[in-house]
Image (cartoon, rainbow, N blue to C red):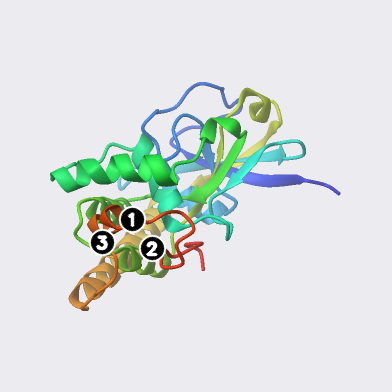
Amino acid sequence: MDKTITVYHGSKQIVEVPSFGLGRKHNDFGLGFYCARSIDLAKEWAVSSLNDGFANRYTLDTEHLRILNLNSPEYSILNWIAVLVDHRLFTIKTPVARRAKKYLVENFGLNENAYDLITGYRADDSYFDYAEAFLNNAITVEQLSCSMRLGQLGEQIVIRSEFAFSRIRYEGFEVAEKDVYYTLRKTRNDEANQTYQEILEEESDGLYIQDIIRGGISVDDPRIPRNISQ
């Protein structure tokens, strides 16, 4: 069975040879080459308000790759956010947030270094704010999950290991026009913001991060929303 897939990397430049070990360590899942299965999402991520970008196209042979799929039913939204807080720089506003970061990493964290490839949602723009609000005990885990789903997050594929880099091949590029794709990205973000504000207006008796810590809630607790793509 052919396990070769097509992926796209949105960038300000053409990238013919992705390089292992480069990138920013504070990206969602740490160092790696960030791609999407959707060319439209890659184009959104490639543009700024001032400049066009490029959607670089690759084929990736996934056979024999160790793949961590954070969107599979075996993982919960707290697994995703635990990986996120372990890499991204969050604003820690309260002692609760400091304890929350430690608790999430220790109880819901995963060993990403054991995998060649990670699939999970991108904490882009508003979605990062939601995660930060949850960490600071401002919204419940149910509100976090709901706002993520309704915001239609983009799924990303992150190539992490040297072996995985050896399985990717450049196939060309398409120009991402800022006049089209910056508007699409901004619209998606604005809609997510509106949804988030509506969710905040609703009463919630769900689980805040402080409740999760105090209750010693673990990964198999049925009250924790599972796959955030559902």
The residue singled out by tag 3 in the image is 208
Q: Which structural element holds mark 1?
A: helix
What distance separates the C-alpha of mark 1 from that of mark 2?
Answer: 7 Å
Q: Amino acid at mark 3?
A: Tyr
Residue 18: percent from the left, percent from the top?
Answer: 58, 27
The reply to whether discs 1 and 3 touch (Cβ–Cβ < 8 Å) is no
**Is any part of residue 100 visible from this angle?**
yes
> Residue at the right extreme?
1
Is residue 174 among the parts visible in the rendering? no
Q: Amino acid at mark 1?
A: Tyr
- Counting from the top left corner in percent of width and height, residue 52 is at 41, 44
Report if the CB atoms under discs 1 and 2 are less than 8 Å apart.
yes
Q: Nearer the viewer, residue 213 or 165?
A: 213
In this rendering, position of residue 145 left or right of residue 101: right
Mark 1: few/some/many CA within 10 Å (<14, 14-19, 20+): many
Residue tagged 1: 127
Image check: 219 left or right of 157? left
Q: Nearer the viewer, mark 2 or mark 3?
A: 3
> Is the residue marked by circle 2 packed among few (<14), some (14-19), or many (20+) residues within 10 Å?
many
Q: Secondary structure at mark 2?
A: helix
Mark 1 / mark 2, whichever is N-terminal: 1
Q: Which numbered disc, 1 or 3, marks the residue closer to the eye?
A: 3
Q: Earlier in the sequence, mark 2 or mark 3?
A: 2
Q: Which residue is mark 2?
A: 148
Quarter holding residue 107: top left
